[in-house]
Image: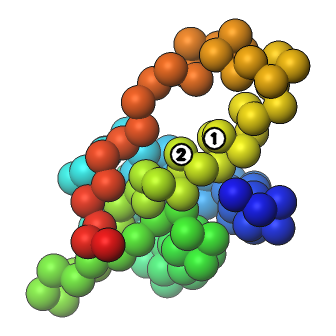
């Protein structure tokens, strides 16, 4: 991952609502959440949810699929894994496996058709 893209990802999750949405989507895994579910869970207006999800999507951290009149959002596992790799690449003098047990957690399965 290039530094500029990593910065875009950090900027996207560097806001309270977006970080909360990202974390909810991360815990949902492949199931994801409908935009309305996120609005309800975070007690914010649907228009705010849409705005914040677009920022996460623009950074490549989430992707959307249409389900009739609803939109479901999921974590973009490959981008999240690339961001984690970027963060850990220089960790512990080039030995990221020493940093934390999280370095060994396998990435979420990607559900988006590539």
Determine the CA span between mark 1 and mark 2.
5 Å
> CB under 8 Å between callouts 1 and 2?
yes
**On residue 81, which mark appears?**
2
Q: What label sits on residue 4 in the rendered view?
A: none
The C terminus sits in image quarter: bottom left
Along the line of sight, the residue nearer the viewer: 49 or 30: 30
User: Is residue 1 shown left or right of residue 80?
Assistant: right
Residue 102, image x, y percentages: 56, 21
Q: Position of residue 43 (x, y in %)?
A: 46, 59
Query: Which image quadrant for residue 106?
Result: top left
Tell me which residue sits at (45%, 24%) in the image: 105
Work out which quarter of the rendered image holds the N terminus and state it. bottom right
Residue 113: quadrant of the picture: bottom left
Mark 2 Cα shell of 10 Å, populated few (<14), some (14-19), many (≥20): some
**How far across and down, in percent of the image, does residue 111 sit?**
26, 60
Residue 27 visible in the picture: yes
Q: Secondary structure at mark 1?
A: helix
**Residue that numbered label 1 is attached to:** 84
Residue that lies at the very extreme toward the left in this rendered image: 68
- Residue at 63% of width from left, 71% of height from top? 59
- Asked if residue 72 shows in the view, the reply is no
């Amino acid at each position: 991952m290039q530094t500029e893209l990593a910065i875009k990802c950090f900027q996207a999750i560097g806001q309270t609502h977006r970080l909360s949405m990202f974390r909810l989507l991360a815990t949902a895994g492949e199931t994801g959440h409908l935009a309305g579910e996120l609005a309800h869970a975070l007690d914010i207006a649907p228009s705010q949810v849409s705005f914040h999800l677009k920022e996460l999507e623009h950074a490549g951290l989430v992707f959307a699929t249409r389900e009739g009149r609803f939109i479901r959002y999921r974590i973009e596992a490959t981008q999240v894994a690339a961001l984690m790799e970027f963060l850990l690449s220089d960790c512990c003098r080039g030995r990221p496996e020493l940093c934390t047990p999280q370095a060994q957690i396998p990435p979420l399965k990607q559900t988006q058709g590539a």
